[in-house]
Amino acid sequence: MLTSDKIIEIFVMVDDFCKESESEIARHQLDAGSYKVRNRKTSLSDQTP
């Protein structure tokens, strides 16, 4: 049976994990302006192999 102390302990562990994972995800994400945008005309080639 789960006691209120055990539920609080699980909640704290999950909360700590979420906080740490959010900071790790934010650290590895690309910034909005950090990648190169290519402005190429989009079309398929008519050449056959």
Image: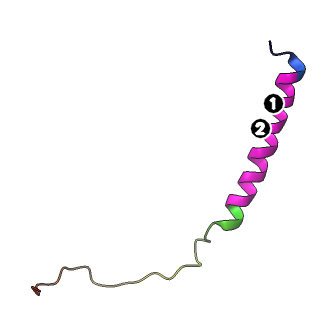
Quadrant into which the C terminus falls: bottom left
Element carrying mark 2: helix
**Horizontal side of residue 9 vs 38, given as left or right:** right
Q: Position of residue 19 (x, y in %)?
A: 78, 48
| Picture residue at 71% right of the left edge, 53% below the top | 22
Span of residues in magenta = 6-25
Q: Residues within 10 Å of mark 1 (few under 14, many from 20)?
A: few
Q: Position of residue 3 (x, y in %)?
A: 86, 15
For label 2, the residue is: 14
**Horizontal side of residue 6 vs 37, given as left or right:** right
Q: What kind of secondary structure does the magenta stretch mostly adopt?
A: helix
Labels 2 and 1 touching (C-beta < 8 A): yes
For label 1, the residue is: 10
**Horizontal side of residue 24 vs 29, given as left or right:** right
Which amino acid, mark 2? Val
Which amino acid, mark 1? Ile
Q: Position of residue 20 (x, y in %)?
A: 78, 52
Which quarter of the picture shows residue 34? bottom right
